[in-house]
Amino acid sequence: MHSQTLPVVNHSFASTDAVVRHLDMNLNVNFDKKVIDGVVSVYYDNRGEAESLILDTRDLNVTKVTAGEKHRRTSFQLGTPQGDLGRPLIISVKPEDRVVTVHYQTSPNAPALQWLSPSQTAGKLYPFLFTQSQAILARSWIPCQDHPGNRITFRAKVKVPKGMMALMGAQNDMVKHPRGEYEFVMAQPIPTYLLALAVGDLDFRAISDRAGVFAEPAIIEKAAWEFGDTEKMIEAAERLYGPYRWGRYDILVLPPSFPFGGMENPKLTFATPTVIAGDRSLVSLVSHELAHSWSGNLVTNATWNDFWLNEGFTTYFERRIQEEVYGKEQSEMEAYLSYQDLVEEVKTLGANNEDTKLLLHLEGRNPDDGVTSVPYDKGYFFLRLIEQSVGRPRWDEFLKGYFEKYAFQTMTTPVFLKYLEGTLFKNDKKAYENLQVDSWIDGPGIPANCPKVTVTSFNEVDTLAKAWSSGTTPAQPKQFSWTTQQWQHFLRALPRTLGNQQMAELDRVYGFSKRGNSEVLFEWFMLSIAANYEPSFAAMEEFLINVGRRKFLKPIYTEMAKTPEGRERALRIYERARPGYHAVSTRTIDDILKVEGSTR
Ligand code: BES
Ligand code: ZN
């Protein structure tokens, strides 16, 4: 069989007649070579009489494959590589086989793996490894049927250098094993994009009986304090939408090169250290990743086109948890900023861009291209509109039932809409029509009936921003007790045309350049680039060298690249910073600065 003839469905080459159910993994993590040596037994369901099992791989060096419990040598073939999809591994099997065992080694450039040198960690003594599998990167470290339409359970044995700790998004032993040998079990079926491993010098602090924080020893105390409300969040989430079904909920704080804010790996959220602000002001990230334990990990988007079913629901659920734990004003400030993000995103993409529709069209593209603020924030506002339409009590009851009914299953946009119409709107067709569902799902831009957010605590912020716009230095009343979100709003509200003297004055009065809060610092850098305020650039360069979180990098590099001198500066910084970034981030920034990707 030739790979050219293999259909690509859901960004995967996987066979549909022989479907994987369980993985038994033996992984050996080699920091010297930057590879994982793997022996993975793949248990599958042969639905018919399939004579081959097809798995996804990317840059895997497959050395041997056996079939059956008795490990009979069998033939296999790797199809032609097809860009980001990798290549199919086609294994000959007998109809009675239920398992194959694949021996392989990952590539040092595997895009799911980031190998950090000791200097990129807080402790500076040990190297660090973490994986990022979403959306279609799992195949670069584990041969699997790598699409969200299927679920698997797994067991794993992982060997790492002595003195280091291994963690997976699974049931963990919670302690360091001196010989570096770890075992994991994932008993609940999960999609492969949730496969996750991290190895480093890690410590643990409990938050409650079922929640805790892993981080490097140098930052564990700060991290444990920052995430101290996690148990309250879990309890709030359970009150809203039903029991937490995964046993423990822990958070792993990664080094700053982690390309995302957070990743909802089951039982073990991966998180950027850039949310550790010292005042719990950025912990909506935890509410978000925790919410995925229902929206995403329990009820999973069936295809990447349905990504908003994961992220829009999660953004909605995140705000509801935030409201429960920190009050309505807090969650409304966050909702307001998210509306601004959506407006900006639609402006950048263009109001008629296909990617501004909730239902995406990612066939033939990398699903990562669909990761914009649209599925998150447009998704959020669509669900908020439904809440407004039917009222909270009925909407909450509906959502609770939805998570219950479809737990451990996948969901498509049409099935969700049909379920919505047939239950919540069964006796009120008019109300359903008023939602103008099509304009949200298949229409571009921001629909006319998008809910509006008004936030009273932004009023004084607007007043002060206006005063600064008029060119004078206003008296400073009580704004030093402002929340992080008020400062974010303030910096966004300032005109992009302030002179150098006023920028200097702003920094003198409010000390933006010395803020430890990454979101505030980010807004300050964005303003500084637009105003071409040079005194900010050294700190910005340092930030860009240190932090690999794409949400910050993308707008900063984009803003810099708008002028010729800015672009030169961006290229200079990027040359230094790039080796420290994850492949997910370099893919995006290479594109913005139009530099050729080197090895990846
Ligand atoms: N699942 C996403 C991260 C992701 C999405 C990784 C698509 C790869 C492909 C995660 O839950 C997320 O949304 N993270 C956000 C944080 C959040 C608070 C909006 C992020 O990383 O910025
Ligand atoms: Zn998310």
Image: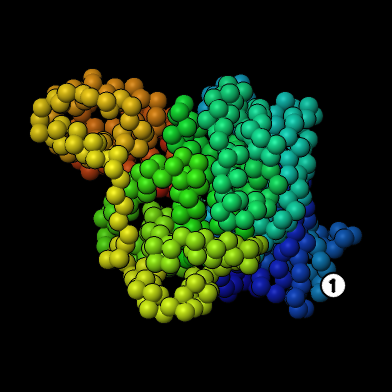
Work out which quarter of the rendered image holds the N terminus and state it.
Answer: bottom right
Residue positioned 44% across, 36% down in the render: 282
| Residue that sits furthest to the right in the current view | 70
Residue positioned 46% across, 60% down in the render: 392
Q: Residue flagged by tag 1: what amino acid is it?
A: Glu
x, y percent for residue 314 = 50, 54
Under circle 1, the secondary element is loop
Q: Nearer the viewer, residue 24 or 482?
A: 482
Q: Is residue 321 visible?
A: yes
Residue 393 vs 163, above or below: the answer is below
298 left or right of 346 in image:
right
Q: Nearer the viewer, residue 498 or 199?
A: 498
Q: Nearer the viewer, residue 23 or 152?
A: 152
x, y percent for residue 236 = 56, 46
Residue positioned 44% across, 42% down in the render: 327
x, y percent for residue 566 = 24, 36
Q: Which residue is mark 1?
A: 96
Q: Residues within 10 Å of mark 1 (few under 14, many from 20)?
A: few
How many marks do you count on the picture?
1
**Which corner quadrant of the image does residue 190 belong to?**
bottom right
CB of residue at label 1: within 8 Å of ligand 1? no
67 left or right of 519 in image:
right
219 left or right of 585 in image:
right
x, y percent for residue 432 = 40, 75
Q: Is residue 539 visible?
A: no
Residue 326 vs 512, above or below: the answer is below
